[in-house]
Image: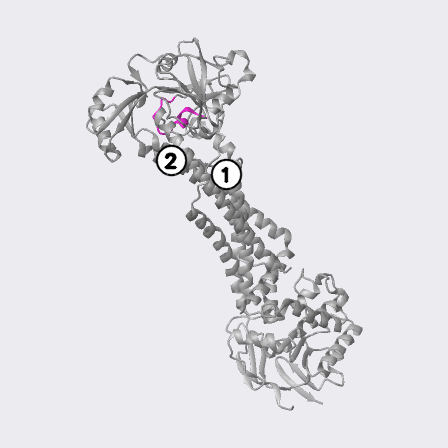
């Protein structure tokens, strides 16, 4: 259980490399996240947490260094395999939720698995089960643009879980929520963690990183790791 | 990927298109309209050409007109004898015909001298044609009959070039199925035509020459031309070529009238091709981030283009067919008719050129799909983390 | 019913309809071919050279035949210059009174 599910080694990411607006977003980060960890990437905005999360979630490739997922180096895999990993291993909850406007809650939740061989009625049943679990069943056929921030986020959570991911990633999940809703979100995350999922959250909200089950807190600043605390 | 996953992507595409119902319906409408117009023109001109070809198969192989100062003149009947002496000529017959403007209904008629009777059992003439030397009788086309409210047995009155009224008993009316050929005809006996137009004696409008072997017609035409330098021989082949040009011109005119719509559509397609809206870009990013492959997104865009362009093409081509062959191209009628009073109420035979339809499909569906896919492809190959970072 | 199936049925329906149109086209063309024999008889007997497709102006009635063109054929304003003569009608002179009446009226 103690072998890392994700291990990064001297991970570095430049944006617009070689251009006038070159940015060094992440520099030389080496961390290990174990299976079943509840990890928090902590730091002010601009500290590189979101980029770190993108790299961990196979959304973008590192400029140098490597990422190992379950012992397999994924930093140089072709796009096709990265997509496959995103689809099978990760569930991603975005800061801006990123739901498809004009579609219903249910359709948004089903979205990730459309281009697979899945049977649509079965997929629908699974999506309804997830919505039931987070109390969104009554909003099932609502278009997402009419939902409140909290409801949109719960829809985004259900969408992240539709592929039964092993790892759940969340980027600044509480940035748009009030305290009550933030605690609510953390309760859902705790529940997932208790069910054995690996949870990685990037946040600078104390509600997220100052709780007893956040086993690993990685503090970042200016793209580099400042401090790693493991409880 | 299996069939089911393709159907899933198509399902999603349709769902996505339905979100912007009015925009997409608008595109389908404009697209359908373009296909409808282009298809109608193709159907119409192709059918006209094929019909004209079949109808004119029976016309004289060679017409000899006399020209004077660049204008057509009456031709002396005596020349027929000399022309029939040319080897290869099997017969020469003078034609007496001309136009008659009827100020009463503001229509042009074509007056024609009868030169024989139709073969027995011809279903396209009710009654009979006047005999070549018969006086005081006429056979008229359906268009003339309609314009003058004429029935079998009634009288039609024309004013001769000398100014006196001539009355003719109607002994024949052409059936409407022959309207494309006979709508404006008034067939009279030869003496009546000569009197009506006050043609000088021993002069005819032109000469119809029949030849033994049509491939020799150009040679014979050359001989006639060198024997009578003031004549202009017209070959049947040239006539048929003229029809190609005329329909080209008329359909070109219609196309010009609808060029505005065409340009609007091209602008629309160009607009789509040159850039995606920020919203579309964002959606592609989201789909990629949650696990759609680049190929899935391209497949979705392919479906999107196909759904719109194929639906429009099919609807447009069906409407064009119905329009041209069931409603006599009523939308184009004003442009086709010009301001003619007698216009054949034709029911065109639906000759269809599969090659033309395939071309139309290739020229509408494929570019549209390409203009949907290409810009999205560019968006689909970028890293999805641009979306994540907002 | 799933939407992809609806779309598939729509496309299938259109193709079937087109096939049906193709069938009627076949029937009507063969009917025309039967009639075209009689049409050819008329053409041959009357020695016609053109179809009566547009007789708005004299020169368009028999496009294959040379003609005596005239600028003012039936009205003073009926300028028969190709191609405008075949799309633009002559102006209305009725407002000018009896003096402008065309012969025969």
- Residue farthest to the bottom, as pictured: A2
Q: Mark 2 points at which residue?
A: B54
Q: Could you tell me which chain the residue with mark 1 belongs to?
A: B
Residue A117 numbered mark, or none: none
- Given residues C49 and C19, the one toward you in this image is C19
- Percent across and percent down for residue C85 are 45, 27
- Going 51% across and 35% down the picture, which residue do you hit? B328
Residue B173 is situated, as x and y percent measured from the top left of the image, at 46, 22
Up-down relation of residue C40 to residue A218 (above or below): above
Q: Is mark 1 on a helix, strand or loop?
A: helix
Classify 10 Å Cα crowding around label 1: few (below 14), some (14-19), many (20 and above).
Answer: many
The colour scheme used here is: one colour
Image quadrant where residue A24 sits:
bottom right
Q: Quadrant of residue B47?
A: top left
Comes first in the chain, label 1 or label 2: 2
Residue at 73%, 65% in the rendered image: A140
Are the residues at dot 1 and dot 2 in contact (C-beta closer than 8 Å)? no
Residue B286 versus residue B104 in the image, above or below = below
Chain letter of the residue beneath label 2 in the structure image: B
Labels in figure, total? 2
Residue under circle 1?
B325
Q: Quadrant of the C terminus of chain B?
A: bottom right
Give the magenta range.
Answer: C56-69
Is C68 included in the stretch rendered in magenta? yes
Q: Position of residue A158 (x, y in %)?
A: 70, 72
- Left or right placement of residue A226 versus residue B212 in this view: right
How many angstroms separate mark 1 from mark 2 (CA)? 18 Å
């Amino acid at each position: 259980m103690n072998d890392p599910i994700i291990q990064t080694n001297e991970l570095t990411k430049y944006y617009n490399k070689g251009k006038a607006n070159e940015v060094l977003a992440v520099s030389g980060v080496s961390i290990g996240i174990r299976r079943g960890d509840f990890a928090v990437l902590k730091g002010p905005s601009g500290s590189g947490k979101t980029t770190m999360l993108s790299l961990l979630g196979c959304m973008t490739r590192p400029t140098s260094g490597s990422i190992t997922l379950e012992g397999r180096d994924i930093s140089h895999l072709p796009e096709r395999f990265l997509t496959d990993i995103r689809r099978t291993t990760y569930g991603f909850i975005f800061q801006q939720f990123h739901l498809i406007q004009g579609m219903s809650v249910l359709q948004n939740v089903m979205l990730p698995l459309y281009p697979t061989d899945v049977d649509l009625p079965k997929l629908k049943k699974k999506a309804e089960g997830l919505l039931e679990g987070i109390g969104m069943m009554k909003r099932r056929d609502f278009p997402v643009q009419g939902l409140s921030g909290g409801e949109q986020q719960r829809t985004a959570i259900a969408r992240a879980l539709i592929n039964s991911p092993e790892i759940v990633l969340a980027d600044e999940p509480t940035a748009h929520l009030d305290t009550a809703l933030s605690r609510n979100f953390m309760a859902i995350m705790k529940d997932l963690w208790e069910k054995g999922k690996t949870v990685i959250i990037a946040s600078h909200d104390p509600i997220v990183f100052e709780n007893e089950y956040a086993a690993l807190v990685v503090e970042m600043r200016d793209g580099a790791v400042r401090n790693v605390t493991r409880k | 990927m299996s069939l089911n996953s393709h159907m899933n992507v198509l399902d999603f595409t349709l769902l996505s298109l339905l979100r912007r119902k009015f925009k997409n319906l608008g595109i389908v409408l404009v697209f359908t309209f373009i296909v409808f117009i282009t298809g109608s023109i193709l159907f119409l001109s192709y059918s006209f050409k094929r019909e004209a070809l079949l109808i004119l198969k029976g016309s004289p192989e060679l017409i000899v007109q006399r020209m004077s100062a660049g204008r057509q003149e009456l031709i002396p009947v005596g020349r027929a004898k000399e022309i029939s002496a040319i080897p290869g000529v099997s017969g020469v017959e003078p034609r007496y015909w001309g136009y008659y403007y009827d100020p009463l209904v503001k229509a042009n008629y074509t007056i024609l001298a009868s030169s024989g009777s139709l073969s027995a059992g011809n279903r396209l003439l009710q009654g009979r044609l006047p005999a070549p030397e018969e006086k005081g009788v006429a056979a008229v086309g359906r268009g003339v009959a309609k314009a003058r409210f004429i029935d079998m047995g009634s009288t039609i009155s024309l004013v001769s070039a000398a100014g006196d009224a001539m009355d003719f008993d109607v002994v024949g009316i052409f059936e409407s199925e022959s309207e494309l050929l006979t709508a404006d005809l008034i067939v009279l006996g030869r003496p009546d035509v000569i009197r009506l137009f006050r043609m000088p004696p021993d002069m005819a409008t032109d000469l119809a020459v029949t030849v033994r072997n049509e491939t020799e017609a150009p040679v014979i035409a050359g001989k006639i031309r060198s024997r009578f330098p003031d004549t202009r021989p017209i070959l049947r082949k040239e006539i048929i070529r003229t029809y190609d040009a005329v329909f080209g011109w008329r359909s070109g005119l219609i196309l010009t009238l609808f060029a505005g719509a065409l340009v609007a559509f091209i602008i629309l397609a160009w607009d789509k091709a040159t850039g995606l809206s920020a919203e579309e870009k964002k959606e592609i990013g989201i789909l990629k981030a949650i696990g759609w492959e680049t190929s899935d997104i391209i497949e979705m865009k392919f479906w999107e283009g196909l759904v719109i362009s194929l639906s429009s093409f099919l609807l447009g081509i069906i409407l064009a067919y119905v329009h041209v062959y069931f409603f006599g191209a009523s939308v184009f009628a004003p442009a086709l008719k010009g301001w003619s009073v007698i216009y054949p109420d034709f029911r065109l035979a639906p000759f269809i050129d599969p090659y033309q339809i395939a071309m139309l499909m290739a020229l509408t569906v494929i570019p549209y799909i390409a203009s949907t896919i290409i810009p999205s492809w560019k968006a689909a190959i970028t890293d999805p983390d641009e979306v994540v970072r907002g | 019913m799933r939407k992809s199936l609806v779309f598939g049925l729509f496309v299938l329906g259109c193709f079937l309809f087109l096939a049906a149109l193709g069938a009627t086209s076949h029937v009507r063309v063969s009917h025309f071919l039967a009639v075209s024999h009689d049409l050819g008889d008329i053409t041959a007997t009357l020695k016609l050279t053109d179809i009566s497709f547009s007789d708005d102006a004299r020169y368009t009635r028999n496009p294959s035949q040379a003609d005596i063109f005239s600028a003012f054929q039936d009205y003073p304003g009926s300028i028969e210059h190709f191609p405008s003569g075949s799309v633009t009608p002559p102006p209305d002179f009725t407002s000018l009174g009896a003096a402008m009446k065309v012969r025969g009226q």
